[in-house]
């Protein structure tokens, strides 16, 4: 499985704690066979695909269904009465479809008022449109939602965006990343990203982080200092200690 497939599969794990609501239509009580309208049949096929798909980019069967139902996927995403996970899975389906219309719609979801749509759209863009994902992630590191801010930092790390290093140093001390002077978990992810992306700052800048009150930052900093001493590099795909 390639990295793109792994990226999409990871998104499924992200919401594994949510159970998909029962989407099956009621079975006719009459013994007589009832013809199913074509539009209803297509809707059933789409919902079945959304239930069953692992959202791998190599899943050609699901991809075909999703490509043929872009408008219905958009409708499901926007329908607040639909179950949370169905809407979230519909966002992933647009990523699997990989049409220009789908990607354009994903970009528009970044402005959604609902945090989980902004979050899932960013994750999807990280897989299907890296250039757009970098632009979006830089913006979302300032999102009101802590979860979205964290996803943005993780995306910048995965995408290897070295140009975001000054922004990440700034956000490490931003007031929204503290709660009553207590360090929030997004700061651990910021440090993890800096460990990978920042290859220009002096060693003293990282050494200073060992004085941070949040001791959970220290493990990543020590790895960086060790790397600086040895001359080795730390890749974005190396295991992270951040939760």
Image: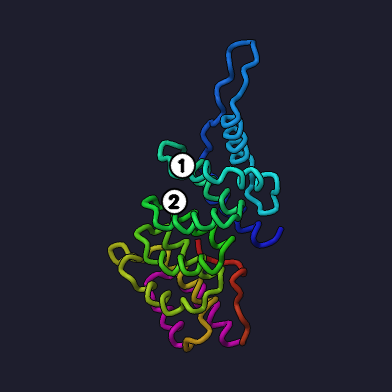
From this viewpoint, which residue is outermost toward the top?
31
> Residue 29 location, x and y as percent?
58, 13
| Magenta-drawn stretch, dominant element (helix, strand or loop) | helix
Q: Is residue 135 above or below residue 93?
A: below
Residue beneath the point at 58% across and 82% down: 227
Q: Where is residue 59 in the image (x, y as percent from the top left)?
A: 69, 49
Q: Quadrant of the N terminus?
A: bottom right
Residue picked out by circle 2: 116
Residue 216 seen in the current view = no
Residue pushed farthest left? 180
Residue 81 sits inside the magenta stretch: no
Instruction: Say whether disc 1 or disc 2 marks the residue closer to the N-terminus.
Output: 1
Disc 2 crowd rating (10 Å Cα; few below 14, some 14-19, many 20+) is some
Q: Which residues, given as a range, are shown in magenta? A: 204-230
What residue is rendered at 61% in x and 86% in y? Answer: 230
Q: Which structural element holds mark 2? A: helix
Query: Do labels 1 and 2 touch, CB within 8 Å?
Result: yes
| Residue 150 in view (yes/no) | yes
Q: Where is residue 115 in the image (x, y as percent from the top left)?
A: 40, 53
Pick the residue in front: 21 or 14.
21
Toward which corner of the image does residue 101 lie, by quadrant?
bottom right
Asked where in the image residue 182 lies, by quadrant, the reply is: bottom left
Q: Mark 1 points at which residue?
A: 84
């Amino acid at each position: 499985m390639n990295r793109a497939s792994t990226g999409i599969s990871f998104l499924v794990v992200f919401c594994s704690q949510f159970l998909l609501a029962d989407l099956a239509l009621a079975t006719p009580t009459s013994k007589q066979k009832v013809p199913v309208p074509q539009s209803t049949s297509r809707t059933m096929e789409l919902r079945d695909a959304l239930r069953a798909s692992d959202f791998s980019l190599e899943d050609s069967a699901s991809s075909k269904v999703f490509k043929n139902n872009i408008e219905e996927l958009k409708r499901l995403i926007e329908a607040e009465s639909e179950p949370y996970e169905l809407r979230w899975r519909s966002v992933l389906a647009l990523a699997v479809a990989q049409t220009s219309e789908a990607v354009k719609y994903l970009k528009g979801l970044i402005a959604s008022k609902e945090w989980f749509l902004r979050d899932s759209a960013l994750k999807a863009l990280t897989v299907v449109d890296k250039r757009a994902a970098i632009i979006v992630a830089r913006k979302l590191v300032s999102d009101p939602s802590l979860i979205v801010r964290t996803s943005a930092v993780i995306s910048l790390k995965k995408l290897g965006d070295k140009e975001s290093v000054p922004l990440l140093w700034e956000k490490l001390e931003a007031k929204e990343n503290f709660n009553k002077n207590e360090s929030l978990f997004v700061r651990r992810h910021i440090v993890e990203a800096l460990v990978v992306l920042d290859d220009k700052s002096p060693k003293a800048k990282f050494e200073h982080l060992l004085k941070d009150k949040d001791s959970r930052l220290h493990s990543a900093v020590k790895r960086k200092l060790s790397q600086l001493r040895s001359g080795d590099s730390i890749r974005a795909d190396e295991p992270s200690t951040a939760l």
